[in-house]
Image (spheres, helix red, strand yellow):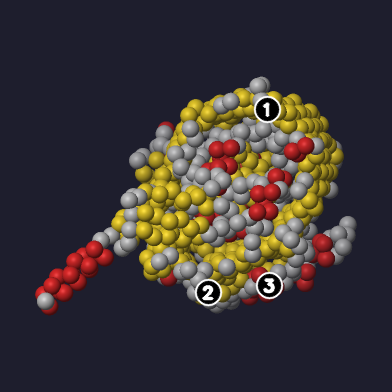
Amino acid sequence: MKSKWILGACLLASVNAQAWDLKGKIRDAQTGEEIIGASVVVKEEPTQGAVTGLDGSFNLSVGRKKYTLVCSYVGYQKYEVVVDGSKSEIEIPLKSDDVLLEGITVIASNPGRTEAGARGIEKQAMNVVNVMSAKAMELSPDITVANVIQRMSGVTVERNSSGEGQYAILRGMDKRYNYTLINGVKIPSPDNKNRFVPLDIFPSEMLDRLEVTKSLTADMEGDGIGGAVNLVMKDAPSERQFTANLSTGYNAMYFDRDFQSFNYGDIAKQSPYEVMGKPEDYKVTMDNFRMSNLRMDWKKPLPDLTAGISYGDRFFNNKLGVMLAGSFLNTYRGKESQIYYQPGTTHYGIDYRNYSSQQTRAGVHAKLDYNINDNHKLTWYNGYMDMSEAEVRDGQDDKERQVRMKWNHQYIFNSTLKGEHLFLENGKLKLDWSAVWSKAFSETPDNAEIYLQGTHVQTSGAAVRRWEHNSDQDKAAYVNLSYKLQNAANGTFDFSVGGMYRDKKRDSFFNEYTFNSATGSKDPQYLGEDWNNFDEILLTPRPYGNIGDPLNYDATERIGAAYGMVKYTYGKWEFIAGVRMEHTNQGYVLKFARDVDPEGNQKYTDILPSFHTKYNVHENANLRFSYARSINRPSFFEIVPYSIINEDYKEKGNPDLKHTVADNVDVRYEFFPRSSEQFMVGVFYKKLDNPIEYGLINEGQDTYYKPMNFGTARNLGAEIDVMKYFNWFGIKANYTYTHSKVTTDKRVMDGSEVTSKRQSRPLFGQAAHVANLSFLFKDTKHGWEGQLAGSYTGKRLSDISNWYDDDIWEDGYFQLDASVEKSWKNGISVFAKASNLLDIPLLRFIQKGPHTADVDSERKDGNVIERKEWHGQSFMLGIRYRL
């Protein structure tokens, strides 16, 4: 009897031990987007559950034939479904918990915070656009927009002196050919000569998404031959959201060398000339200058510190949305450089240069939106981005030493009030408008350079100290009116008209002073004997500084634009045709004119047609064709009739410089197998009339190096972009090939005479080959995710010489970065980031040829090495909280 009970218990246990396997996928009920990280729990057995992976899928093994699944995800309604064990696969739709947003058409837009949302924007766009989501930026090893953007297809970055990314180069087109937007509104530049915006001033964590537009429609500003970068800042969420993060790190460069810093807090913000009230007699003595700010320290830097906080919520029955965000970054970076050979300069052995750079960034923004009713909405955005950099450059060869102590501070502020209004039945008539005030500012006060001969201070020209500051203010207004005409038989027409007006005012100040050694040539000041720190050097200024430099100027720019555009949708086809007219009035006033007219301006009007078509080849796949005409205006300083005497040539402005006009063609096939995945392949072609490049021209007995127009240039290439996700593993890859050609005049020695010779080359800063490859890992069950990212930039022009065959090239460069994050259900996560893991040196060279045959310097593949640079690995460890 006992054995029968035992047998029965075993049979019952075997029945209960049987497991039913279930595979499933969770999607957004409205968009079909796979939801990553959603929770799936068996109601009858709460310990049994799973979390969806990178492709929105999950796997469960349940010990009962019939059970109830409970599915949940932040921002979605809970969903329960009864599952019978006979089912092996299931698909679960989750509905958004955001009832208000579903009901108000005027704000029903995809924010692009997720990878699926970013792919949705790319898929729905009429022009060629690439989007990076906030989630992708969060997982990226990068902390600034300038470093993040290099992961995108067809984008390379120009780096600053400490090796950090600074400016974007789109499809090989130099930074001058692109423009930057915040929330779709152009922002001014803190540069004292040009109009491009440094992207390293923006912390990436403050963005909802990053958009790179590569073909322009008629409703976009036309001065983007390369394209436009749009920073879409964090928007108010549909429910309360709070995030905070804190991290610290270190740069490996300072494991074995000291960080050099100086007392920049004692810098006088105004030059002696400004302090004296800008008198006619501006003679100075040493009493007009401080020395305390030149005191230098050599020590290990403090760890890096980054912090961010954001709060978003909706109030008054969800009518008012609020998003407040702040970010702070304090990082210590640097560079170690070895200069072997520079054309036209004399080196005594290798010139070793060490850079120490402390970069402090602070950003705050407030974004409010108020839904007056279902048809009317107001948005007010205010953003302030601030960056300061204290840099020491200490360089020496076998005979000479140069030390530079430079502190730069710049900020960008933008305030935009925007209205969106729907009229007529179903909102067929739409009006939106924006009023904008923006300001960019930059100052570099008391930028000091000290020159030594061996171990003593140089007698004549012992030091140079200069003050620079400039501001750029914009007042702008935008208005757009669109009307939808729908006919079931003949498709849908969307008509749009609009306009824009911008009034820009810019000022620039420059003041420089040269110093001699106060003890004269008979009594040199030796390091270790007469002085130990730079504030102890005895200097005497030359009585009159340079206040008449042409960098003292005011500039204005007034741009008026109007456009008309029509979109036609019929079946699988979408067409957009439009034309934009832009009128430019760009002028300048020289504050200290020298034998030239102190005032001048340029006026011109451009008609910019565009045409885009999209065909739905098959499900989730589009074929695109885009054509657009665009322009590039000269930089502010380029049309100023300045003249600067340099060492071996004179540099000169060009008031007759023409703006560049380009015709741009794009063809792209794109396939979105799933909402988070994509495959894109495309080709592009650009024909530039009057491209602006610097070259040589003979005027009288002199040869000048000046900005000029060089006929016609062509730029063409191809792009491939792939994203593929599995349950726990994903791949992101892109490759861009670019080819361009421009011909300019170069100097060449003909016996004892200097003549000019034509030479063709690629556009400045363009790499023929650019590739990115990232491997993503996600263990949703245990809360782990990570990324290993490699980036390759091929050979490109680094410095353009005015001599024939003496251009300096940057060799191909590969960088490897990584990040990892562990998350818990209580909203806390810890993360680690590591950049430049291989620390491969950046190499610059001059190509081999007859002109380098007699050069006695280190070579690679026969090319003369100009310099090598190392930036060190950077490591960061942090914690993040999300409510």
What's the residue at 74%, 61% (across, down)? 317
Q: Residue 584, position in %: x, y?
A: 79, 34
Ranked by sequence position, the earlier of labels 3 and 1 is: 3
- Which circle, 2 or 1, is nearer the viewer? 1
Q: Residue 746, position in %: x, y?
A: 57, 31
Q: Secondary structure at mark 1?
A: strand
Given the image, on which type of amino acid does mark 3 rest?
Gly
Q: Quadrant of residue 525?
A: bottom right
Q: CA distance from mark 2 to mark 3?
A: 17 Å
Residue at the disc numbered 1: 492
Residue at the disc numbered 2: 302
What's the residue at 16%, 74% (across, down)? 5
Q: Nearer the viewer, residue 371 or 365?
A: 371
Ranked by sequence position, the earlier of labels 2 and 3 is: 3
What's the residue at 75%, 57% (across, down)? 319
For the N terminus, the quadrant is: bottom left
Given the image, on which type of amino acid does mark 1 rest?
Thr
Given the image, on which type of amino acid does mark 2 rest?
Leu
Q: Does residue 647 appear in this view?
A: no
